[in-house]
Image (cartoon, rainbow, N blue to C red):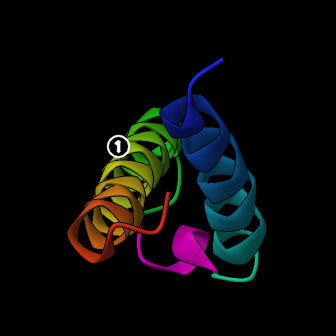
Amino acid sequence: MSVKFFVYLFVTIGVIYSMDAVRINQIFKKGKVLQARLFYFFLAISLIYLASNFIIDFFEASKIY
């Protein structure tokens, strides 16, 4: 398997674990559960993409692997 797969896997675990500490429900109106879940999902996907690409680009630039 490629290194990118493992980077995405570990970053996904880290992002989901860290986002669990944020109270996103207080931002949204009552009864807007679907919108809150979609926001949480897209925020998680965005953070996973950004963090993974940063790590991969950092290692490629420094020629570590």
Question: Which element type, helix, strand or loop, lies under badge 1?
Answer: helix
Left or right, 43 with reference to 1:
left
Which residue shows up at 57% across the image and 37% down it?
3
Does residue 25 show up magenta in the picture?
A: yes
Q: Which residues are magenta?
A: 23-28
Residue 65's place in the image compared with 2, above or below, is below
Front residue of 6 and 16: 6
Front residue of 44 and 53: 53
Asked where in the image residue 9 lies, by quadrant, the reply is top right
The residue tagged 1 is: 42
The image shows residue 2 at horizontal and vertical percentages of: 56, 25
Which residue shows up at 63% across the image and 82% down it?
22
- Residue extending farthest to the top is 1
Which residue shows up at 61% across the image and 63% down it?
15
The image shows residue 45 at horizontal and vertical percentages of: 40, 43
Left or right, 31 with reference to 62:
right
The image shows residue 32 at horizontal and vertical percentages of: 45, 45
Does residue 62 show up magenta in the picture?
A: no
Q: Amino acid at mark 1?
A: Phe
